[in-house]
Structure formats: C-alpha cells, structure tokens
Image (cartoon, rainbow, N blue to C red):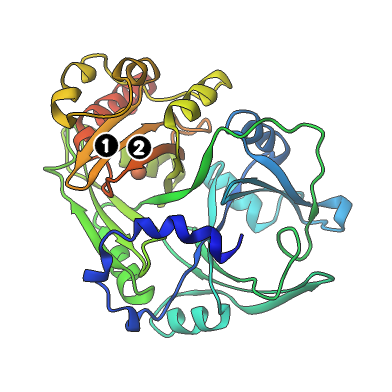
Amino acid sequence: MSVNNLTQLDNFNYGIEKIFDKAQDFLPINGTDYVELYVGNAKQSAHYYKTAFGFQSLAYCGLETGNKEYCSYVLAQDKIRLVLTTPYNPDSEISHHIRMHGDGVKVIALWVEDAGKAFAETTSRGAEAIMEPTVFTDANGEVVKSAIKTYGDTIHVFVERKNYNGIFLPGFVKWESEYNPESTGLKFIDHMVGNVELGAMNQWSSFYENVMGFANLITFDDKDISTKYTALMSKVMTNGNGRIKFPINEPAAGIKKSQVEEYLDFYRGAGCQHIAVATDDIVFTVSEMRKRGVEFLYVPGTYYDTVGERVGEIAEDMKILKSLGIMVDRDEEGYLLQIFTKPVEDRPTLFFEIIQRKGAKSFGKGNFQALFESIEAEQEKRGTL
Ligand code: FE2
C-alpha cells in the first residue's frame, strides 16, 4: 500500500475541514492497516472469505513458520487486509476471547507514520495501554507496533511500516495458494461500527474525541432509528482526514429487544458490529457474492414501490437493484447504494455492509426503517426479539 493509492479516499473528507483544525490533529492516520478476527478455525474461515468474498491469499504464520502459539492467515482485496487468527493453546488469551465472544473482531489496526508518538499521544490522554511501542524486524526491515484498548475486548494497534518492505509484517511468509478465486470488487473499508452497552455511547464517542482526536460527524437518536418495537442511537466519529469513520451504537428503550441488545447478549459485551466495505460496482459485487453463497438481509418488496420517489433519478436499473436486494438513499451531495449481509458466524453478531457511494457521504438514514424491520424479522426467527 502506498500513499499514492490513498488519493481516491481523499474524496471522502466529508467536509470535515470545517470541524477540524488540521494543526491540532495529534493522531494523523494514513488509513486502516488491517482488521484481525479471532476465529475458531482460521483455515476454514480463510476459505470462506476467499471463495465468498473474493479475497486473495497474502501471508501466513503458524507452526510451519515457527509460531507455536497461533496461526494467522492474511487475506487481501485491493486496500483491505483481513487477518484470521486461531490459537493452538486452550489457555491462551486468544482462546479465551473466542470462548467468550465467538468469532469476532479483535484488532482494528491503524496505519500511522509514528507508532511511538501515536501511543504517547493517546495514553497521555487516558487510553489504556495494551502494548508499548515495540520494534519487530526481519530481513525485510522493521515495523513498530503499539496498541491501546477501545470498547469491549477490542483493541487498536498502531502500525508504523515506513521502514518495511516485506509481504505483511515480520514473522509472516508469503502465502502461496493454488486456489485463487476472482475478486468481487471490494476496494477499501468505508467505516466500522461498534456496539456498546446501554448508556455507554457518549463515553466511547468522548474517548474517540478526547483520546484519539476524532470529531463527531453525525448523531442519530432513537427518533431517527426506531421501528414500532426497537430502537438504537448512534454517533459517527471521524478522524482528521476522514479516512477512518467509527459509528458507535447503543441500544435505546423499545417495546422489544433491539438488534444492539441481541448483539451484546451474544457477543457477551461491546464489540464490532459491522465492517462496511466499498465497491465501485455494487451490482457486480453483490451478484458475485450471492452466487458464491453470501447471505444478505431480505428487503421487503414494497420498499421498491416508493424508493424511486424518495431518491429520484439514479444511473442503475431499479429492477436489478430489487432483484439483488440493494437499497438506495440520497443526501444533499448525491446518493449511495448499500446492502447488509446476515451475520457471518452462528452467533448473531458481526456482519458486513457493501456500500457504493455516488456523491453521498451519509450512512443511509432513509433505509433505516426498512433495514430494521428486516433485522427484526430475523430476530423473530431466532426468538431474540
Ligand atoms: Fe454501516
């Protein structure tokens, strides 16, 4: 990944110059470095993400490379790097994490120029330290990593890789595979959402504001996001250049159990709810993913009776969007197309969003109603509404 590759992401600066004083950005972030999931069987998960999502094999560590504690498979698709890790030892912290949470996101790694400074700036503002700045080296150079805690058992790792030209990180070897399914057109991570406990949204949005130097882009209250039965509240936090966006959700009081409460029950606490990945061609991406077995949330057919009126003229054929279950929303700056997978593990926890932005910089508020009704229908089936 080079700095040049990031220029297209700069289109997503969200007009945040208005809310940011760049000189005061004490935690400059180049982008998401990688996302690491702790999973029960990384070998099989890797096969799923390659086959169904179109990721490519990139790097590996495990017994064959001298790692006797865990194995990690690194998958890549354009700018996205996904790391899948499984422990060999039942007493390890990774095993404990999987026992508690099931498969889920452990690390949201952020690519920085100076991992020592990132650690100093955040811990001096109250971040809980997980790993002091540490240098990792191999024949390809050195990487400095440091880490702090965020919501639940999730952590942020700061990765400084300017003096490294290996395949991923020291300790990893290139993963050569004879099985290389085609990409589905996923490009980069648009945003990653955290679910936190009732009453904890402001605590965590303040954490991102005060400790990480982020700003609040938008707030949705329970009047924006509610159905007859369930509700949630959300604050979208963004870093100084807009490349990192973390909406934080908390459940709100409703007649029945909200999707966020269901997540918190099954994840046994706060954690990453969904990873939104961007594509330039959502019709192609979703057609491919459906063909390869990815399950998406069902969108009621009646949604398409009125969506045309709401969003006006769009370039895509609404009949095709309807057949694929892709939703559309418009804001002042353009429109966006989006769709949500069902949870990608047996616990109703982590899922993915596929998003294509055509000018719009918002998050699909106009689809909240249809979306939450669809999620409630799934909760009903699970007996968790
Ligand atoms: Fe999202």
Q: Position of residue 176 (x, y in %)?
A: 82, 43
Q: Is residue 98 above or below residue 348?
A: below
| Picture residue at 32% right of the left edge, 15% below the top | 319
**Which of these two is toward me, 11 or 342?**
11
Left or right: residue 90 versus residue 38 is right
Quadrant including the N terminus: bottom right
| Picture residue at 51% right of the left edge, 45% below the top | 187
Q: Position of residue 354 (x, y in %)?
A: 42, 36
Q: Position of residue 198 (x, y in %)?
A: 26, 52
Quarter of image, ligand 1:
top left
Q: Position of residue 48 (x, y in %)?
A: 64, 31
Quadrant including the C terminus: top left
> Disc 1 to disc 2, how far (Cα)?
6 Å
Q: Residues within 10 Å of mark 1 (few under 14, many from 20)?
A: many
Q: Label 1, on which residue?
A: 258
Q: Quadrant of residue 301?
A: top left
Mark 2 residue type: Glu
| Picture residue at 58% right of the left edge, 47% below the top | 78
Q: Is residue 247 above or below residue 134?
A: above
Tell me if label 1 and label 2 are in contact, CB under 8 Å. Answer: yes
Q: Label 2, on which residue?
A: 262
Q: Residues within 10 Å of mark 2 (few under 14, many from 20)?
A: some
